[in-house]
Image: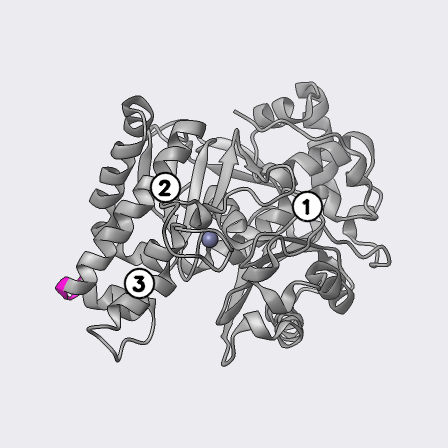
Amino acid sequence: VSADPDSAANTWDAGLTGNALRVAAALRTHGPCTRGQLVQATGLSRPTVSSTLTELLRAGLVVDETRAASGAAGGRPAALARLSRAAGVAVGVDVGRRHVRVAVADLGHEVLAEREVRLAQDADDHPDNVLDLATALVADVLSEVDIGHSDMVGVGLGLPAPITNDGRIGSPMLLPAWADRDPGAELARRLSTPVRVDNDANVGALGEHRWGAGQDCADLVYVKVGTGIGAGIVLSGRLYRGAVGTAGELGHVTLDARGPVCRCGNRGCLELTAGGRALLEHARATQPQLADLDGLVALAAGGDPGCRRLLADAGTQLGLALGGLVNLLNPQRIVIGGPLSAAFNLLRAPIHRGLSDTSMPAAAGGVDVVPAKLGERASALGSVALVLGDPVVTTRAPLAHVPPVASPG
Ligand SMILES: [Zn+2]
């Protein structure tokens, strides 16, 4: 949780107080809302919500939208209020081992632009280069959609490591070159904007929850299966971070207490059998030319029996580990993301097999296991969602004083 106290004032400082601030904060957190949803989210009366919306419409901060009601065909169109681009924009930065991706959305939750750069070197080893590149990329994306730097209310940063509540790397062994850094503060300094940092799977969960396969689902687990395996847990519509912020390290759940030692220092972690690093190592025994996980997925899709077997076994192990989580949390949906989600049709049955071996029938039967919808965009969009759902990130804005609002519906 890093914020630059010297950041320039943003549009939220422009005279918003009282009910206007409260309604705007609810719209920023929840996206386009009906009057009824705003009444529920703000605790204000319907006439007060209506008059406040009129005030915000006149100020150009809110626009009126009418959309077909979701669900019932031919249902009455719902009048929605959403924050306009004039209210400001939020930026998300996703750092992976070999990429930096940036997304920008307005505070009305409309995604305006995205851009990605592939890295020649591992991001793990070059934090300064990565932060410089991210800074340049943010400037590029903003200028692409003709938005000024001062319209940026905050930046979310997703990193491939457990992140503690104070924005530090929670397990130095997992991202050694970043371990002594304060990445949020360093990016905030470069951008002169408040920055909030979180784990890549956590922001992936936020992204899928806001825009992807986790929409309209209050209790979900997003699993990012790539080089490592991480989970982002959303409970009652909110990201669950745990006491120090590192909840969801599914890849380091021990499946075999006498198994090989993992890079985290424990034995027999899920990552050692189902993580991308392990899968590639095994696959290369018969396919030495294999470049990356995408290649492995492509071979499996093309019928290679060894690669299919590796993915099936990985699915079973994943299911076994998820079973414990299903027993404890009873989620409604498990969203499989990351590079391996492209092989979801090969993973689905083995995941269910593993799940049913380690979880109660009622809980296992009540959970949908589905592929992610956003693909490689999930973590950048989720980093945007980190800012949208977090008015405190605008340190100097009065929004910080608005009490948290309940989620509508
Ligand atoms: Zn481990």
* Image marks 3 and 1: residues in contact by CB distance under 8 Å: no
Label 1 Cα crowd, 10 Å radius (few <14 / some 14-19 / many 20+):
some
Q: Which residue is mark 3?
A: 279
Mark 2 to mark 1 CA distance (whole Å): 25 Å
| In this rendering, the label closer to the viewer, 3 or 1 | 3
Classify 10 Å Cα crowding around label 3: few (below 14), some (14-19), many (20 and above): many
Residue 303 x, y percent position in the rendering: 13, 64
Residue assigned mark 1: 165
- Vertical placement of residue 230 versus 404, above or below: below
Taking the image as shown, residue 278 lies to the left or right of residue 347, namely right
Who's the residue at 80% across and 48% down the image?
395
| Type of amino acid at the residue the image marks with label 1 | Asn
Where's residue 44, x and y in %?
A: 71, 21
Residue lying furthest front: 258
Q: Determine the CA span between mark 3 and mark 1.
A: 32 Å
The reply to whether the residue tagged 2 has its Cβ within 8 angstroms of ligand 1 is no
Q: Is residue 103 visible?
A: no
Going from the N terminus, do you reach mark 3 or mark 2 first? 3
356 up-or-down from 295: above or below? above
Disc 2 or 1, which lies upstream in sequence? 1
Q: Position of residue 83 (x, y in %)?
A: 64, 44
Q: Secondary structure at mark 3?
A: helix
The one of 404 and 66 positioned closer to us in this rendering = 404
Q: Could you tell me residue 86's position as x and y percent? A: 70, 52
- The number of numbered discs placed on residues in the rendered structure image is 3
| Residue at x 59% of width, y 40% of height | 241
Magenta region:
301-305
Helix, strand or loop at label 1? It is loop
Q: In which quarter of the view is residue 185 placed?
A: bottom right
Q: Which quarter of the figure has residue 29?
A: top right
